[in-house]
Image (cartoon, grey):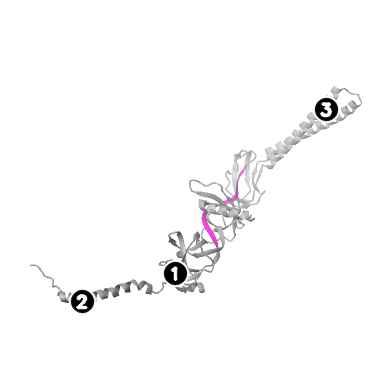
Amino acid sequence: MSSVTPSVPRKIQRALAPLFIGLAFWVVPAYSQQPDDMPPPPVTVAPVETDTVDVEGVYAGRARGSREVEVRARVDGILEERLYVEGQVVDKGNALFRIDEEPYEIALRQAEAEQANAQAAYNQANREWQRISSLYEQDAVSQRERDRALSEFELAEAQLAMAQAAVRDAERNLRYTEVEAPLAGATGLEVLPEGSLIERGTLLTSITEHDPIHVRFALPEDDAAVQRAAREARLAAGDEHEYEAELRMPDGSTYPESGTVDFTDSTIDPRTGSVTARAVFPNKEHRIVPGQFLRVKLILEQYEDAVVVDETVVSEGPEGPQVFVVDEEDKAQVRPVELGPVVDGRQIILSGLEVGERLVVNGHVALQDGMPVDVAEDQADEE
């Protein structure tokens, strides 16, 4: 069974047609004029300002002694005594070990006796040479006798020099039986116990200089390039000061003494893409110990009087990064900008903005170039 849709009588259709046509002419213009009648979008503005901004980097590092030396025996013998407390800090020249000195005392006495013998032979040869040379000038002796006396004198002189050198060598060896600290620092464990027979070159202990302390760390390749360029610029300006460094301890606290970066390697490690660097810090109280894990904070670059904006106001336009400013007629204007680094949420603008311009800090998402806006000042900026 089919259904039939009731139809509108033709007379009624003809009567209503002018009404629908008029309504259409009224509605269409109304919709087309609506955007022009809408109020300008509200935006918040703040004046463009400058500030000094430090670009910082924090890097993991390990502490190392500024000097680490191995203390070795310089003569053979029996290790008789250890003269220091393991782990204590010693001064340069402090006695650390004593090696049996008796053989070296005997060797010294023997060398001194040989020196005395050589001295006597030299004195005799010298007197003979003086006598023969005087007679030779008087034509009382022959040329052969003169030459013989001269040769004996020169031989005695050489033998005396050898004997004197042997005495100095024996004195040095005797002195080396007392092993002294070559530098001030913290001592390590003894390697061999007392009573051991040692040879020249045997390792006895080690000493590490703690003040100053070195911290080695790795700079990423990009940061190293920034640091290098900034350093070259400073040198060109006549500033030869080293980079200052700040140290963070394992508990997160800041070390009270500042340091300097005294070395940056000229090559990049291909395995890590980083550059080895070293910072030096005073460590008189020995709060930092070698092997300790630390963090080094550097100011890689400093921008003085830099235009700085909140990074959220920068958008991506057809020509790259852009911001909006408001002109004197309260219309939005697009400003293409060149970006620098972002520091703590603050975007450095290298070019494209002028100090004092009214920057749109809120409400810029739907803006278009030349669009009228309803301006409100940034309350936070006014405060």
| Callout 3: SS | helix
| Callout 1: SS | strand
| Callout 2: SS | helix
Mark toward the start of the polypeptide (2 vs 3) = 2
* Mark 1 vs mark 2, CA separation in Å: 51 Å
Looking at the rendered structure, the kind of residue marked 3 is Leu
Residue 65 lies in magenta, yes or no? yes
Residue 306, position as x, y percentages in the image = 55, 63
Looking at the rendered structure, the kind of residue marked 1 is Asn
* Mark 1 vs mark 3, CA separation in Å: 106 Å
The quadrant in which residue 201 appears is: top right
* Mark 2 vs mark 3, CA separation in Å: 152 Å
Identify the residue at the far right of this view.
138
Judge depth for marks 1 and 3 and give the one in front: 1
> Pointer 3: residues within 10 angstroms few (<14), some, or many (20+)?
some
Q: Are marks 2 and 3 in contact (CB under 8 Å)?
A: no
Is residue 29 toward the left or the right of residue 224 in the image?
Answer: left
> Any mark on residue 150, and which?
3
Residue 48, position as x, y percentages in the image = 52, 67
The N terminus: image quadrant: bottom left
Residue 141, position as x, y percentages in the image = 89, 23
> On the image, numbered disc 1 is attached to which residue?
362
Q: Main secondary structure of the magenta part?
A: strand
Mark toward the start of the polypeptide (1 vs 2) = 2
Mark toward the start of the polypeptide (1 vs 3) = 3
* Extent of the magenta region: 53-72
> On the image, numbered disc 2 is attached to which residue?
16
In the image, residue 307 above or below residue 158:
below
Is residue 335 toward the left or the right of residue 184 in the image?
Answer: left
